[in-house]
Amino acid sequence: AALRRKGEVDVKGGWKVGEPVLYAALTKAFSLIEATTKRLEKTAILTSFLLLVIQRSAKADHNSLLQAVYLCINRLSPDYVGVELGIGESLLIKAIAESTGRSLSLIKADLKREGDLGLVAMNSKNSQKTLFKPKPLTLPFVFSNLRDIALTTGNSSQAKKVSVITKLLAACQDFEAKYIVRSLEGKLRIGNAERSVLVALAQAVVLAEKEKVGKKWSQEKLTARLEEGANIIKAVYSELPSYDKVIPALLEVGIDGLRDKCKLTPGVPLKPMLAKPTKAIGEVLDRFENKRFTCEYKYDGERAQVHKLEDGTVDVFSRNSEDMSKKYPDLVDQLPRCIKESTKSFVLDAEAVAIDRLTGKLMPFQELSRRKRKDVKVEDIQVQVCLFAFDLLYLNGEPLLQRPLYERRELLRQYFTPVPGEFDFAKSSDSETTEEIQTFLEESVKDGCEGLMVKMLDSDASYYEPSRRSVNWLKLKKDYLAGVGDSLDLVVVGGYYGKGKRTNVYGAFLLACYDSESEEYQTICKIGTGFSEENLQAHYDALKPLETTKVRGDIKVGGAKPDIWFEPKIVWEVLTADLSLSPIYTAAQGLVEDRGISLRFPRFIRVRDDKGPDDATGPEQIAEMYERQALAQSNGKKKKGGD
Ligand code: ATP
């Protein structure tokens, strides 16, 4: 199908081998992808486009494919470098007005009607009469301009940005203005998740290899090869999430050589392994029956992936792969004291926890969140942190992901030394009975932790699984035992004006979960509880700039009617009494029943700065929670009935 679609994706006149990719070809592919809801078709279209890019690139040109992939996932650099777009609505409206000669008020009125600034830009451009056809935009030109816009800071940066955007828009034809504006907004809205882009990339490379050597494969062989390629790329990328490294390697050594060429590398943060929630110790024992496992304290701090390179550089990365070295200069300073001489390079998985150095007592996350987030000076630090290491993923030139946890833990203890108040190993107990686990859990809570993490210790089931929420790691929080269930991380998508004491701020909010399959936000509840007055003011300040004129197309609203909509950016952790089926909200619709699922009595816990909207709880997790709850209720009833 991808080969068939190649002609469809190409642009009139094409572009020749060795010439820069035309931006029109990319936007043509985007519009075809947007026009279909079928996942396989979306991937096939993207595969065709990437195949064209590979086949028309000059031999040593890695940049064309790299830039094409970046624009497909709407990023300009790896996450940890943090070159980001996300230009505000008002700036874009100004640039559209300047490049088309239309008035601001007309553009705003169109936006109110259409709800999509990209579409408004395209229609504004296409209704304009032009004497001369502008020179075609090329992909490298657009990419470097977008990067310049993202990197412009300081005095009069707004004006500079508007001027570059205006020039870009002036050169746009056909679909180009629509997608340039959406890229600038930071959301493409073509329904293509990064996972599908990885699959398309793998398929394009396999097909290019096949065509190049004129291989004749049966349909089965081709299908198997495409699937194998996709699995290899996904595995490699989860270990080394940097297209800057993976794409040149892919073009150089092909799919088969990729695993050897691209391995976990200090300096490039990998996506962390995540845990599944469990509600009772009995459930832990059921899951890990007859297996060796360990229980560790679940510290209440912030995840920190600490990298040390051979040259002595130390980097601290967040759960989201953001560079936190400027937030934790004290951790960077402390680190050399806990490393043995033979420890040259490593990647640690750890939790940074606020600590009272005088008493050695651990402090809750709220204390840690009082620290400044950027440009912290060691001498100004009030809240001290201790690093609790629970895993070692790389040591002295060797990735350890595919070693059992007990071996990784051995090496961790061998190559690092605890320093009181600064560095320690996560406290663990390889207990096996309900009583032992219960005692350890109570101890962890008494020591200021959230509960336990229970991890498989032996065999390949205990390998480190980057970016996976794995059944081989279970979290047992004290809250679950009280029957409240796990907390959810939800995106704030709407606001309700406050009444009474809350008139100058939003009084309640509309929350949504995020479906990474369909790339849409699904509404889940209205929340107005758990906020202090200070909280509400801070939320107002953070959310006000995110107000949008109309609800975005990727928010599945259902019957919710907030007074105002927000760009989905901010994530909150929320607890709920229980979940119920709802005729209003759309979360997990179709997974349990036709109706969606909603939270009853949701309560705000905290802002999750370390999570982006794409990391919010997904509909499957919500459906799973609902089903567990239904099961627990029916078991409870049975018990009461004398079962
Ligand atoms: P999730 O995406 O799983 O919901 P989260 O960031 O919301 O993750 P939790 O669900 O509370 O956090 O649990 C996982 C987190 O617990 C890890 O990301 C890590 O920050 C923290 N943690 C504390 N102690 C440990 C430990 N011993 N092992 C692993 N993680 C730990």
Image: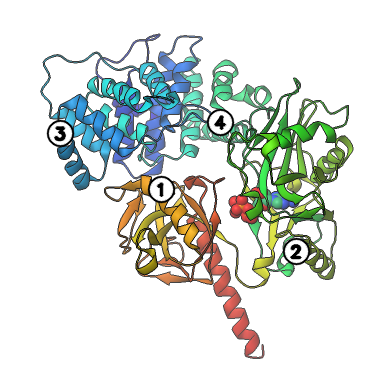
Q: Earlier in the sequence, mark 2 or mark 3?
A: 3
Q: Residue at x 31, y 32 (%)?
A: 181
Amino acid type of the residue that numbered disc 2 sits on in the rendered structure: Val
Answer whether residue 595 is visible to the viewer in this image. Answer: no
Q: Earlier in the sequence, mark 4 or mark 3?
A: 3
For residue 114, side relative to residue 204 (left or right): left
Disc 1 and disc 2: Cα gap in Å?
34 Å
What residue sits right under mark 4 in the picture?
229
What residue sits right under mark 1 in the picture?
568
Q: Quadrant of residue 440?
A: bottom right
Examine the rendered structure and indicate whether residue 629 appears above or below residue 242: below
Disc 1 and disc 3: Cα gap in Å?
28 Å
Quadrant into which the C terminus falls: bottom right
Disc 4 and disc 3: Cα gap in Å?
50 Å
Quadrant into which the N terminus falls: top left
> Which numbered disc covers residue 445?
2
Q: Residue at x 43, y 71 (%)?
A: 581
Amino acid type of the residue that numbered disc 1 sits on in the rendered structure: Pro
What residue sits right under mark 3 in the picture?
103
Q: Earlier in the sequence, mark 1 or mark 3?
A: 3
Disc 4 and disc 1: Cα gap in Å?
34 Å
For residue 57, side relative to residue 324 (left or right): left
Question: Furthest-front residue in view?
Answer: 380
